[in-house]
């Protein structure tokens, strides 16, 4: 189960509509819906806002259920770091989220540039 499926599962278990969750997040329902349909990837800050809106811990986003057995969808050291993150103050939490978001953007930019270079080379 990926993170979007986990968000949707928790939302449904709590009996909330997408609109109700969006309202809790002070987010436009269309923007929230784009996350649920994978048309937009949530940033770490958005994930934290969603966790708060659903009244769950961030760790729950990284855990999944499979036939009644709990299965970690990330490795244990990373899961432990996510748990420890909850002990930090808001400034520290935001700094970590910003670093992760920056790393993701950099990775995607490198991939896009590599793809563009490969296309340009193939055309020559």
Image (cartoon, rainbow, N blue to C red):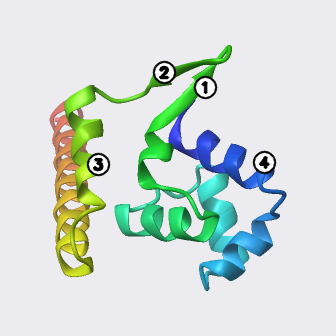
Label 1, label 3: how far apart the Cα atoms are: 18 Å
Residue 103 appears left or right of 19 = left
Residue pointed to by mark 4: 13
Residue pointed to by mark 2: 71
Q: Is residue 52 above or below residue 59?
A: below
Label 4, label 2: how far apart the Cα atoms are: 19 Å
Q: Is residue 113 above or below residue 44?
A: above
Q: Is residue 72 above or below residue 97?
A: above
Q: Position of residue 50 (x, y in %)?
A: 55, 65
Mark 3 surroundings within 10 Å by alpha-carbon count, few (fewer than 14), some (14 through 19), many (20 or more): some
Residue 96 appears left or right of 49 = left
Mark 4 surroundings within 10 Å by alpha-carbon count, few (fewer than 14), some (14 through 19), many (20 or more): few
Q: Position of residue 62 (x, y in %)?
A: 44, 39
**Which corner quadrant holds the N terminus?**
top right
Query: Which corner quadrant of the image does residue 73 belong to?
Result: top left
> First in sequence: mark 1 or mark 3?
1
Q: Is residue 24 above or below residue 8?
A: below
Residue 50 shows in this picture: yes
Q: Are marks 4 and 3 in contact (CB under 8 Å)?
A: no
> First in sequence: mark 2 or mark 3?
2
Label 2, label 1: how far apart the Cα atoms are: 6 Å
């Amino acid at each position: 189960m990926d993170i979007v499926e986990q968000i949707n599962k928790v939302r449904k278990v709590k009996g909330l509509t997408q609109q109700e969750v969006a309202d809790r997040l002070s987010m436009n329902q269309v923007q929230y819906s784009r996350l649920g349909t994978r048309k937009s990837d949530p940033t770490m800050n958005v994930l934290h806002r969603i966790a708060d809106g659903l009244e769950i811990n961030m760790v729950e986003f990284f855990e999944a259920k499979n036939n009644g057995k709990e299965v970690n969808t990330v490795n244990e050291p990373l899961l432990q770091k996510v748990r420890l993150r909850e002990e930090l103050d808001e400034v520290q939490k935001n700094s970590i989220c910003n670093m992760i978001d920056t790393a993701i953007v950099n990775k995607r930019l490198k991939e896009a540039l590599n793809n563009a270079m490969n296309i340009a080379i193939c055309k020559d």
